[in-house]
Image (cartoon, rainbow, N blue to C red):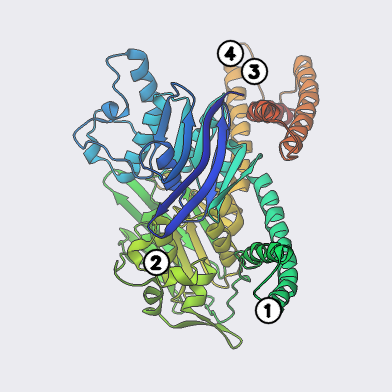
Amino acid sequence: MTPYLDVQHLTKSFGALTLFRDISFSIGEGQKVGLIAKNGTGKSTLLSILAGKEGYDSGDIVFRRDLKVGFLEQSPQFDPDETVLDACFNHQGEEEKVLKAKQVLTQLKIRNLQQKMGQLSGGQQKRVALANVLLTEPDLIILDEPTNHLDLEMIEWLEGYLGRGHRTLLMVTHDRFFLDRVCSVILELDDHTVYTYRGNYAYYLEKRQERIDNKRAEIARANNLYRTELEWMRRMPQARGHKARYREEAFYELEKVAKQRLEERQLRLKASNIYIGSKIFECQYISKRFDDTIILKDFYYNFSRFEKMGIVGNNGTGKSTFIKMLLGQVPVDEGRIIIGDTVRFGYFSQEGLQFDEQQKVIDVIRDIAEYVDLGGGRKLSASQLLQHFLFTNEQQYNYVYKLSGGERRKLYLCTVLMRNPNFLVLDEPTNDLDIVTLQILEEYLQDFPGCVIVVSHDRYFMDKVVDHLLVFRGQGDIKDFPGNYTQYREWERLGNAKESKETKETKEPAASSKATYRHDDRRRLSYKEKREMEQLEKDIAALEEEQHQLEEALCSGTLSVDELTEKSKRLPLLKDELDEKSMRWLELSEIES
């Protein structure tokens, strides 16, 4: 495997704050690497350093000679007067490149290539920047939160695009479905250093827990020995011989280990003092439109007590507008929404909260309340809530202006929860939050004794939290689905297979004007189709076994770099082949039944 990037002993600080110290890692040709870290620990800074946008204190960064690097920034900047097409690349009249640009931009829902960049929203500009990176076909693609501002359809397209072929990739993302399906190596930036896990996200979770357990055991052993050695240090006179001085030096090294502090996960935060009545809200045949865009048309829904609903759909289909109508921020055109008397909304919006930059983090929360009553005599103070969401004591007394973008979103979330609502409405809560915070939020929502509505493109998060979906398909078409996102996608896939079969069947009679069919006639499988179905069953079984063996091998941690690369390239191709054969088998099986 050809080395593309080698990082050795890299250190970066901002004043007294050290982001990472003496870190080393490498990326080889064809590797797809995901970078994971908590908010504020330097993920975006590290990507900017590698892309040459920011300096560093010490260390070496070596790229393969003549390597072409493409970098997607978290907040890209464009000339507001240039067109979308010009912003992508200097096409210089080359027809092939223009055609390719149109194809990629269409997938990302950017259709007016002559529109000025200054007329686009921040999310649209991020998508143009993503297209820019993909179209320039770099050897190494560096992506900072590529799925932000993409809807589910775009995310799944990008997942397939990056997963195919021999592309080399380094990215930061909070989308764990995306991470699991695209990346075969995980880098974790934690406690100023970097850890490498040669496997996908599921493998990383397992091995990370092993690392933490081993570290915890090492600290416990060091503490036991430290107590003994501390007693010896106190007894011994200052004038010591060579052997005693050696033991004294070992004591100070032991002390460093013993005084290490691992981030201890808090117990799951469960509130029992939340009451909500049986009447939640009822949408009584509401309608809403903006010019030619229909958001809702005669929509009726009666929300159940303790329901946890997810709202999904492509951008522009009206998800956020529906939420704002529910909260009374946008009026309905027709119909009405009746809210129960006991409902207290807690709203986490995409726009976020405007903070006083000179205020301390703890004071932002204390201005709302000193504590939350959890019931049963338990209270949660402002500091404890912040600590639960991974704000250290030091960070709590920092000023807001020192926070990263992700830390601000996390603080905003804490301001919503501190008001102790009984109905949480969360509009894209996962954007810019680190994975550890997402896991804490998932647990909080799973245990939340009130009602929840989540609008999100994060498939992993939705599967963990919601048990019911409203799917906004556009122009007022809304599907009410009793299940989570993965279940919905499976239902949709089976439905498409059935629709494909029915379309084929309706065309076949028209092929021969002499053929006549009775309504109760049922087409049977031909001899050739039966043999095809038998072969498909054998092929699917073989592919599933190969997939199982590949996944076990990738998670074993025993593969060489070349073997890991080879198997990582095979896995997405295998999954595509398995999907194709399974779809064909479903078509044939429905004819057979």
- Whichever of labels 4 and 2 marks the residue nearer the N terminus, that label is 2
Between 314 and 131, the residue placed more toward the observer is 131
Residue 405, position in %: x, y?
39, 56
Q: Identity of the amino acid at label 1?
A: Arg
Label 4 with label 3: CB-CB less than 8 Å: no
Q: Which residue lies under the disc numbered 2?
A: 337
Q: Residue at x 46, y 22 (%)?
A: 65
Q: Which image quarter is the N terminus in?
A: top right
Residue 447, position in %: x, y?
61, 69
Residue 492 image-quadrant placement: top right
- Whichever of labels 1 and 2 marks the residue nearer the N terminus, that label is 1
In this picture, residue 531 sits left or right of residue 70: right
Q: Residues within 10 Å of mark 2 (few under 14, many from 20)?
A: many
Between 382 and 93, the residue placed more toward the observer is 382
- Whichever of labels 2 and 3 marks the residue nearer the N terminus, that label is 2
Q: Identity of the amino acid at label 4?
A: Ala
Q: Does residue 310 lie above or below 523 as drawn? A: below
Q: Which image quarter is the C terminus in?
A: top right
